[in-house]
Amino acid sequence: MARSAPTTLGFHHITLVAADARRTLAFYHEVLGLQLVKQTVNFDDPSSYHLYFGNAEGAPGTLVTFFEWPQAPRGRFGVGGVHHLAFSTPTYETLLKWKRRLQDLGIPVSGPMPRGYFNSLYFRDPDGQVLEIATAGPGYDVDEPIAELGRNILGQQPHQLPGTRDEAMIARTTYGEPVPTITPDMALTGLHHITGMTDDINRTSDFYEEALGLKLVKKTINQDDPDTPHWFWANYDGTRVLPGSSWTLFGWNPRSPHARPGVGQTHHVAFRAKDDEEQLAWRDHLTSIGLQVSPVMDRQYFKSIYFQAPDGQLLEIATDGPGFAVDEPKESLGAELKLPSWLEAERAAIAEALGPLR
């Protein structure tokens, strides 16, 4: 029987590996409209940039961060890794605007795919990471009552599956006019969901409920590979699924290869703790169920603890504060290279090694 766990408020951030910080800045800021809210270094490897993108305030749940490791090998999909991350857009109309914008910029994009619980576009960033933009609705209660989410294994409708969905219609569906700029209604509002891969979906389900207090809200299939289960967990109290808390997994064959860290792959996924006290409670809980948990690490803008899921996925619990305005004004977040106090004496050498970001 799973022990009672605190329940995370959802994602804090996701960290990926990039080969070129400048190219990453151009794509995530100029193409997707995310704000660079902090340029700093990887505190465990000060020779590399660590860039944070999110909304204007750098709020938890909107953050995508990057380590620049140009010499790292290319990463590989696999068990214990992330398949894709999804950003949220409000409506189907704004989703079509995103498709037209990406098309006009010469970025290959597929969709809109009818996923039942939301509609989706798929494309890749310059390093090959699969990205998704997904609509906020219609939601997980379209095929089972809100009070009974996750109780039954559900199939999908023919119009959602390969071989029977209208691929030609999907390909030609787009917005009717060019979208040269990101209009206010299009602004990406944060992380919609993150999808990983596991080799034992039942064991993994027990882990995320016991360790993170997430509840199973959907048991269905991978619409692009109907032989593969696709399960969804979230912060769910029986009446509502908290936006920005959906962690989903494809259940791959136990003989599938494991993920290989590197460029174009995820380094870790971070969940939220509201403050230091709650984070310490999380640490006590995680160690009580037998997990190896790091000491609390001061990341300047939040504090972190790290541990691994049974399939090898590196996870973090990060505090909401103190936030990105601790070392520069809110109105100029991300404008200059910021270093923690213990690295200031090395600023000149670090800056020279990094080179200018802009």
Image (cartoon, rainbow, N blue to C red):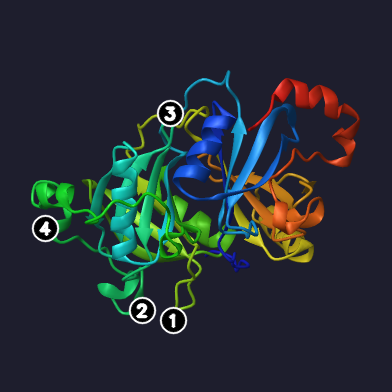
Q: Are marks 1 and 2 in contact (CB under 8 Å)?
A: yes
Rendered image: mark on residue 239: 1
Q: Report the front residue among 256 and 51.
A: 51
Q: Looking at numbered disc 3 in the image, what kind of residue is underneath it?
A: Arg
Mark 3 or mark 4, which has the lower sequence index?
3
Q: CA distance from mark 1 to mark 3?
A: 38 Å
Rendered image: mark on residue 56: none
What residue is shown with label 3? 76
Identified at 17% across, 56% down, the residue is 160
Mark 1 or mark 3, which has the lower sequence index?
3
Secondary structure type for disc 1: loop
Tag 3: Cα neighbours inside 10 Å, few (<14), some, or many (≥20)? many
123 left or right of 190 in image: left
Identified at 27% across, 63% down, the residue is 153
Q: Are marks 1 and 3 in contact (CB under 8 Å)?
A: no
205 left or right of 39 in image: left
Q: Are marks 4 and 1 in contact (CB under 8 Å)?
A: no
Rendered image: mark on residue 158: 4
Rendered image: mark on residue 146: 2
Mark 4 or mark 1, which has the lower sequence index?
4
**Which quadrant of the rendered structure holds the C terminus?**
top right
Q: CA distance from mark 4 to mark 1?
A: 29 Å
Secondary structure type for disc 3: loop
